[in-house]
Image (cartoon, rainbow, N blue to C red):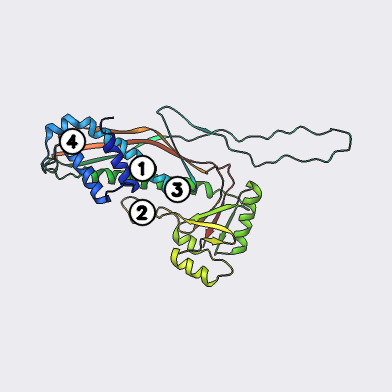
Amino acid sequence: MKHKKLIQLGIDIAQGTTGNYSKEESNAKFREALNKLTGSEDGHFDAKAFRRNKTEIFEIIEEVVDARVEEGLKNQFDQFVDVRSVKFGDKLSFLPETDELFEVAEIAGGTNNLNRQRLTHGKPYQVSTGWEGVKIYDELERFLAGYVDWEKLIDKIERSYQQKISEKIFLALQGAYNSIPVPYSTGGTWDAEKFNDVVAHIEAATGLTPLVIGTRKAVRKATPSFVSEKMKDERNAKGYFETIDGITFGVIPQAHKIGTTDFVIDDNVLLILPNGNEKIVKLIFEGQAITNDEGERINADMSKEYSLLKKYGVGVLTSTKFGVYKLA
């Protein structure tokens, strides 16, 4: 692609890998290059330049938003979310592993009288994907005056998608853990014995040592039976006990529901996840982002409209044994 370096710069800014340049310098270079394509390098929008370069501008936005949204979610939820990308029309099937073991039977010497056994497999699981998009507009005068900051616009779109997808991830998880039966589910005020019972059941079912995740407020409620001075210092530095009874705890960043001050994630839930190769949440992006332009038409309110669409889906492997502690 002609503007591969510009696309990579946009991705590097999000990843904080801008080499010898500061983030501010890199943002300035990215903004300068976009303004040149939109004909706004002198501070005034050039409609003809924008029309000539519109396809390239949209391709840059699509590529940068795709990479930054997916990379940001991987970094944020790497502990328990499996992020995959497929081509349009492709579907991924996941075959959950069974928790059952072979029965070992006692046999008489000199015989081979054993019943044949075959492990059953879970049903193949597919994540349904669907289109979701944002439509943005601005007054025509702001375009003509060169006031639309395309770099900041891309950043806002990226963060909006990340926040919406984060919300969908936790809604999917909530639907899954609300149906978790005893002994993998417990609740009430923090109790180390009840917690260790759930941990023991996860270990027995999966053969894996669990990892516990929750918001900062949730993990702060988990406290070990014995606390040394060193542990107090570590808790003060991190805000929570990173290890309790040999089990590692991790914090999920909280987020607001878009347009509100309501939190997305329940501050009273600890997820107790088998810490293995299989991640319980599957996030599938299908195809690339698509940018739509309303063409040369100007709305009755003298505004211009653009939309960006992405196709994705979120699913939870409910056959995987994981636990939940609902704190009071």
Residue at the bottom extreme?
Answer: 229
Residue at the top extreme?
Answer: 89
Residue 227 pos. (x, y %): 55, 70
Residue 271 pos. (x, y %): 52, 53
Q: Earlier in the sequence, mark 1 or mark 2?
A: 1
As helix, strand or loop, the secondary structure at mark 1 comes to: helix
Count numbered badges in the picture.
4
Q: Nearer the viewer, residue 280 or 297?
A: 280
Q: Is residue 27 left or right of residue 255?
A: left
What residue is shown at x 45% (from left), y 48% (from top)?
77
As helix, strand or loop, the secondary structure at mark 3 comes to: helix
Label pair 4/2, CB-CB below 8 angstroms:
no
* Amino acid under disc 1: Val
* Amino acid under disc 4: Leu
What's the distance in space between the residues labelled 1 and 3, CA to CA? 12 Å
Label pair 1/2, CB-CB below 8 angstroms:
no
As helix, strand or loop, the secondary structure at mark 4 comes to: helix
Tell me, for residue 69, which label it has, or none.
Answer: 1
Q: Residues within 10 Å of mark 4 (few under 14, many from 20)?
A: some
Q: Which residue is mark 2?
A: 256
What's the distance in space between the residues labelled 4 and 3, CA to CA? 35 Å
Q: Residues within 10 Å of mark 1 (few under 14, many from 20)?
A: many
What's the distance in space between the residues labelled 4 and 2, CA to CA? 34 Å
